[in-house]
Amino acid sequence: MEVLFWSIALPGFGHYLNGKLFKGTVLIILEFLVNVQSGLNYAILPSFHGEIHEAISATNFQWLMFYPCIYLFAIWDAYRDAGGGNEPYAFIPFVFSAYIGTIGVVYSPTFNINGVYFGVIWLPIIFLILGFLIGKIIRFIILKQVNRKEKVS
């Protein structure tokens, strides 16, 4: 769990704890590169103050679209290297979180509910959580099918 939480804090930190210094360094460099090029840290500040349109206008979406996949891969890989995720198809919730989080980035400048925009920070986070839950459901269905086939055999 320690590795998982450090990876959530900053991609690459969990790898350092696992002794994977090269991989951790590469992920930290990717994190900083994508973060700076996308304007993510700048977008966080106005987003927390409710200035969603300012955050959207400061964001480079061509770079930000990489972020969910790098972030979730770093979390999954550090967790797996630490001995977690050994169950069949344990990666699926992480993968779907990355996929659907990226969709959240794509729609963040335009998606709104009754004129309320969630923006480049909150919508992708909501979509990451939604993607994780969808991944859990898909994993459950796959495991159920695999178990059914094994019983028939």
Image (cartoon, helix red, strand yellow):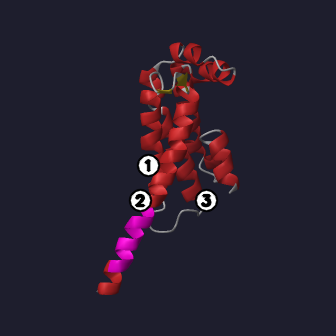
Which of the two labelled residues, at mark 1 and mark 2, occupies the earlier sequence position? 1
Element class at badge 3 = loop
Label 1: state its secondary structure.
helix
Identify the element where label 2 is drawn. Answer: helix
Q: Nearer the viewer, mark 1 or mark 3?
A: 1
Residue 148: image location, x then y, percent? 35, 79
Q: CA distance from mark 1 to mark 2?
A: 9 Å
Please identify the dominant SS of the magenta region: helix
**Residue in the foreground of this view, choosing between 123 and 29:** 123
Nearest-to-viewer mark from 1 and 2: 2
Q: Which residue is mark 1?
A: 96
Residues under labels 2 and 3: Cα distance? 24 Å
- What span is in magenta? 139-148
x, y percent for residue 47: 63, 22
Residue receiving disc 2:
138
C-beta proximity under 8 Å, tags 1 and 2: yes
> How many residues crowd mark 1 within 10 Å: few (<14), some (14–19), many (20+)?
many
Residue underneath mark 3 = 82
Q: Amino acid at mark 1?
A: Phe
Q: Residue at x 45, y 32 (%)?
A: 66
x and y percentages locating residue 8 in the rendered image: 63, 44
The amino acid on which the numbered mark 3 sits, given as a three-letter code, is Ala
**Can you say which quadrant of the picture contains the N terminus?**
bottom right
